[in-house]
Amino acid sequence: MTELVEKLYSTSDLSDSELKQLIETDDADTAEILRKRADEVRRRYYGTKVFLRGLIEISSYCKNDCLYCGIRRSNKDADRYRLDREQIMQCAEAGYELGFRTFVMQGGEDSYFTDDVMCGIISELREKYPDCAITLSLGERSSESYRRMKEAGADRYLLRHEAADSELYRSLHPAEMSLEHRKKCLFELKGLGYQVGAGFMVGAPNQTTENLISDLRFLQELQPHMIGIGPFVPHHCTPFADEKGGTL
């Protein structure tokens, strides 16, 4: 197992069977060696700095019905809210005074935030805070929407692919959503010049080691600028309420 860790460290790649061995091992010594090597890579690129982002949760409304998500449209008990332009600017002003230099506007796929609305907000933020990065996490939108928001001043876009295996993706999302379209959005965002973030859940219902390997292979193909990997946490108002949460 140590040899696999060193091979991964030196080549940044392993075969599927080797990845499976490494993911499934419960050997504490191997895990510690892997942690140390990962820390070395982190320090090589980022040193010991801590990067803070100012998240502005702009809406809890969402048109989608993802089976794992607490703000899914079928959840009638969700506490819904929506920030207006003035409230968003107030959040940015407070964040800037606290030292934040990255603003992340994040929310469900809320039809209120049309291209005109979002471009107006982005343009105002860009004009007022030219030294700040503007990041968006607003789900799947049209190519034209992504283009307009980029031209308005957005720098980055976060869109986790959630599951790169089509069967697993279908088990987590409603029928009207597709993995193919999500992947298309991610590649379009890269093509438009965004710094792109993707990522996936660990411990999702019915997820296998092979599914995780599919996620890693997709990220190798996409080469995103940011990767978010987080545990599946069951929400009490979803069909997965009784599932066990994932671990990292």
Image (tube, rainbow, N blue to C red):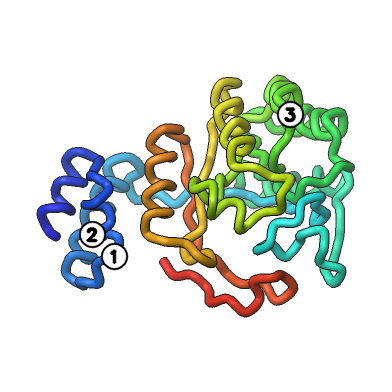
Residue shown at the point (66%, 51%) measured from the top left: 55
Q: Give the residue type at disc 3.
A: Ser
Name the spot of residue 173 as percent of width and height, x first.
66, 54
Badges 3 and 2: C-beta atoms under 8 Å apart? no
Q: Earlier in the sequence, mark 3 or mark 2?
A: 2
Q: Which mark is residue 99?
A: none
Q: CA distance from mark 2 to mark 1?
A: 5 Å
Question: Viewed as shown, does residue 173 lie left or right of 122?
Answer: left
Q: Nearer the viewer, residue 22 or 78?
A: 22
Q: CA distance from mark 3 to mark 2?
A: 40 Å
Residue located farthest toward the bottom when viewing the structure as drawn: 242
Q: Which mark is residue 142?
A: 3
Question: Viewed as shown, does residue 238 lie left or right of 27?
Answer: right
Name the spot of residue 116 as percent of width and height, x first.
86, 28
Q: Give the residue type at disc 1.
A: Glu
- Residue bearing the label numbered 1: 24
Q: Give the residue type at disc 2.
A: Gln
Badges 2 and 1: C-beta atoms under 8 Å apart? yes
- Residue bearing the label numbered 2: 21
